[in-house]
């Protein structure tokens, strides 16, 4: 009777005890496995066309850490050197084993930072959230002599990072542009002697799985962004601006970089909005507003007799306005390698010089010598390109190498009218082979048919 009376109570207490113990063990197990889970999540980004910042919860220290740079001593008054505080914040976040480690640059503060390299690899995904303002020293006079003048902020060997925020990166490039060596300082666009090194604002080097999102960046001394030796880069909704005459202020330059997506951004500057250098493959550029500037360029390639390789590039659904060039491929004489598999689709031009241009005689001076070798240009598609062109240059220019002609150029739905006057200018072709799939405005009667015999005589093996 005693056992029967208490038997309904004792199992209940026993079950409650073991349920509590089980939940505690599971909680500890979950805490220890979150970091491992974050790495498997990152690897899935490789197939995602628009890799987002990994989800994180600022209230859960096991999944994320948010570090305000002010907690490391940063002042943010625009005058105090906050470099060491940023380096300490980076090192702390980089060594943390939380799934996501975010460094916060808070709104309402301006942080002065010297030339710095932020080095990986880090333990997990990194976020640099810029809601305030970042700025370098104000010109060459205040740039420390021992610091590199080639670059300002460098991110090196990072696997998994997002540079994002609603803030501003101010390159303070005005005094650099005024160096005597810059092209616009001498008479008739010539340069004068003197030191000429100017820093790139933001450089990613030998890094992968990178996202740049939402930022404003202005007035870089030289390139605004540069990616070297990187893979899986996604740039989204950024705004880059510099004056029309600011020299060498390319918006985004990529070199030896694969799997690049540049979407939904506005770029106006004094050079190429986007420039694609050698060693780039699988590049998708979509919904870009470009101008003023020099347009969207592949190249220049083959300088100093070098070998250059670019393939699988798409530029689409974009607006190019008031630029010196529209969509351009530029190569030096004497180079080798190839540009192939390029598509320019659905692009609107507004008063653009050289809306469509291939220039295999690219030269920055008047004394470049003729050479027989060249970077091969083939399998280039132009479709649905419409708008107006600046009458100082022809609407289409295909200036191809004497010895290595352009081949397999395909044009369809091209309609380019003069921005001023009623005279429609003829396109220019030199040693260019291709096909017209539709009638074009203006008519293109200068493309050659078939495949030139001379192509087989040169080493133009695809890279």
Image (spheres, grey):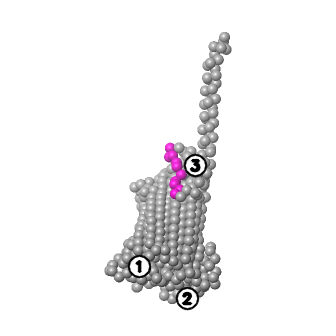
Segment colored magenta: 50-59
The image quarter containing residue 244 is: bottom left
58 in the magenta segment: yes
Q: CA distance from mark 2 to mark 1?
A: 31 Å
Viewport quadrant of the C terminus: bottom right
**Of pointers 3 and 1, the one earlier in the residue sequence:** 3
The residue at which mark 2 appears reads as 370
Count neighbours of disc 2 (C-alpha within 10 A) and say few if under 14, some if 14 to 19, many if 20 or more. few
* Figure disc tally: 3
The residue lying at 43 percent from left, 58 percent from top is 167
Callout 3: few (<14), some (14-19), or many (20+) C-alpha neighbours within 10 Å?
many
Q: Residue at x 61, y 51 (%)?
A: 40
User: Residue at point 50% right, 56% down?
Assistant: 128
Residue denoted by label 3: 98
Classify residue 24 as left or right of residue 73.
right
Between 408 and 96, the residue placed more toward the observer is 408
Q: Position of residue 281 (x, y in %)?
A: 57, 68
The image position of residue 18, as x and y in percent, is: 64, 29
Closest to the camera, between mark 2 and mark 1, is: 1
User: What residue is shown with label 1?
Assistant: 442
N-term mark: 2 or 1 = 2
Disc 3 + disc 1, Cβ < 8 Å: no
Q: Is residue 223 visible?
A: no
Nearest the eye: 17 or 292: 292
Dominant SS of magenta comes to loop
Extreme residue in the front direction: 438
């Amino acid at each position: 009777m005693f056992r029967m009376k208490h038997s309904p109570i004792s199992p209940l207490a026993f079950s409650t005890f073991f349920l509590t113990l089980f939940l505690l063990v599971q909680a500890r197990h979950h805490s220890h496995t979150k970091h491992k889970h974050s790495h498997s999540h990152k690897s899935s980004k490789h197939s995602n066309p628009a890799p987002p910042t990994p989800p994180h919860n600022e209230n859960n220290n096991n999944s994320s850490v948010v570090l305000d740079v002010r907690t490391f001593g940063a002042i943010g008054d625009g005058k105090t050197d906050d470099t060491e505080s940023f380096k300490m914040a980076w090192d702390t976040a980089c060594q943390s084993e939380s799934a996501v480690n975010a460094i916060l640059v808070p709104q309402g503060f301006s942080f002065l930072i010297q030339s710095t390299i932020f080095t990986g690899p880090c333990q997990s995904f990194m976020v640099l959230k810029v809601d305030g303002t970042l700025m370098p020293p104000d010109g060459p006079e205040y740039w420390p002599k021992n610091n590199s003048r080639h670059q300002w902020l460098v991110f090196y060997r990072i696997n998994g990072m997002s540079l994002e925020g609603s803030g501003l990166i101010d390159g303070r490039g005005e005094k650099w542009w005024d160096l005597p060596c810059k092209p616009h300082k001498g008479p008739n666009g010539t340069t004068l002697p003197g030191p000429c090194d100017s820093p790139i604002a933001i450089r990613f080097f030998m890094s992968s799985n990178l996202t740049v999102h939402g930022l404003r960046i202005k007035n870089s001394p030289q390139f605004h962004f540069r990616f070297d030796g990187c893979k899986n880069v996604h740039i989204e909704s950024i705004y880059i601006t510099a004056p029309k005459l600011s020299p060498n202020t390319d918006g985004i330059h990529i070199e030896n970089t694969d799997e690049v997506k540049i979407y939904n951004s506005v770029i106006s500057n004094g050079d190429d909005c986007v420039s694609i250098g050698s060693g780039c493959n699988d590049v998708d550029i979509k919904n870009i507003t470009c101008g003023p500037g020099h347009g969207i360029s592949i190249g220049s390639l083959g300088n100093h007799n070098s070998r250059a390789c670019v393939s699988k590039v798409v530029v689409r659904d974009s607006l190019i306005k008031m630029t010196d060039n529209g969509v351009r491929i530029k190569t030096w004489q004497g180079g080798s390698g190839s540009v192939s598999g390029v598509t320019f689709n659905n692009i609107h031009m507004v008063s653009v010089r050289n809306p469509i241009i291939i220039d295999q005689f690219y030269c920055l001076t008047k004394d470049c010598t003729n050479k027989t070798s060249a970077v091969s240009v083939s399998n280039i598609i132009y479709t649905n390109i419409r708008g107006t062109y600046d009458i100082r240059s022809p609407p289409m220019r295909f200036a191809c190498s004497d010895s290595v002609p352009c081949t397999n150029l395909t044009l369809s739905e091209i309609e380019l009218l003069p921005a001023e006057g009623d005279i429609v200018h003829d396109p220019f072709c030199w040693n260019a082979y291709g096909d017209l799939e539709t009638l074009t405005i203006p008519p293109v009667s200068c493309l050659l048919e078939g495949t030139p015999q001379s192509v087989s005589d040169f080493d133009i093996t695809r890279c």
